[in-house]
């Protein structure tokens, strides 16, 4: 087990029955077994893999119910500021990848006003 547990946030659009969702579920469970603190963030509620994650005591949170990309990113920012993950793993395309890229730019360049 790890001495200093790192907090890892895994992001994906949903937990539907697709291949990316399965891979994220297996990755989250493996990292949890290795001693990491794992949380999963989704944007679209779906329960296909939810029970497997819950059985491993992995918290899964719907970041927002909105379909608006700006609101998704702002909601993710609030979630990240509140939960302070050490690492973010975004899998799949769409909102998780868009949000992860924007979050990286905002982290690297906090002086930039993205609302312009």
Image (cartoon, grey):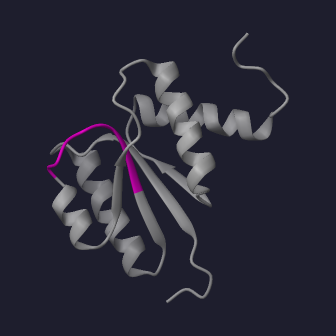
- At 61% from the left edge and 56% from the top edge, which residue is drawn? 84
- At 69% from the left edge and 15% from the top edge, which residue is drawn? 115
Tag count = 0
Residue that extends furthest to the top in the rendered view of this protein = 116
Q: In which image quadrant can residue 105 be found?
A: top right
Q: Is residue 39 above or below residue 108?
A: below
Residue 53 in the figure: left or right of residue 83: left
Q: Quadrant of the C terminus?
A: top right
Is residue 23 at least partly visible in the picture? yes
Residue 111 position within the rendered picture, expressed as x and y whole percent measured from the top left: 85, 29
Q: Is residue 105 above or below residue 30?
A: above
Is residue 100 at least partly visible in the picture? no
Residue 22 in the figure: left or right of residue 9: left
Q: Nearer the viewer, residue 93 or 57?
A: 57
Residue 23 position within the rendered picture, expressed as x and y whole percent measured from the top left: 29, 56
Q: Which residues are magenta?
A: 40-48
Q: Nearer the viewer, residue 54 or 8?
A: 54
Residue 98 position within the rendered picture, expressed as x and y whole percent measured from the top left: 51, 29
Residue 77 position within the rendered picture, expressed as x and y whole percent measured from the top left: 59, 38
Is 42 a magenta residue?
yes
Residue 47 in the figure: left or right of residue 43: left
Q: Is residue 74 above or below residue 83?
A: above
Residue that extends furthest to the right in the rendered view of this protein = 111
Is 54 a magenta residue?
no
- At 29% from the left edge and 46% from the top edge, which residue is drawn? 20
- At 19% from the left edge and 55% from the top edge, which residue is drawn? 49
Residue 93 in the figure: left or right of residue 23: right
């Amino acid at each position: 087990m790890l001495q200093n547990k790192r907090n890892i946030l895994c992001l994906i659009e949903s937990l539907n029955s697709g291949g990316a969702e399965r891979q994220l579920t297996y990755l989250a469970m493996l990292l949890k077994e290795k001693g990491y603190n794992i949380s999963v963030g989704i944007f679209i509620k779906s329960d296909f893999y939810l029970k497997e994650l819950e059985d491993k005591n992995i918290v899964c949170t719907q970041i927002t119910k909105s379909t608006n990309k700006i609101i998704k990113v702002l909601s993710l920012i609030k979630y990240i500021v509140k939960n302070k993950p050490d690492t973010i793993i975004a899998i799949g395309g769409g909102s998780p990848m868009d949000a992860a890229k924007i979050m990286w730019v905002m982290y690297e360049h906090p002086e930039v006003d993205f609302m312009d």
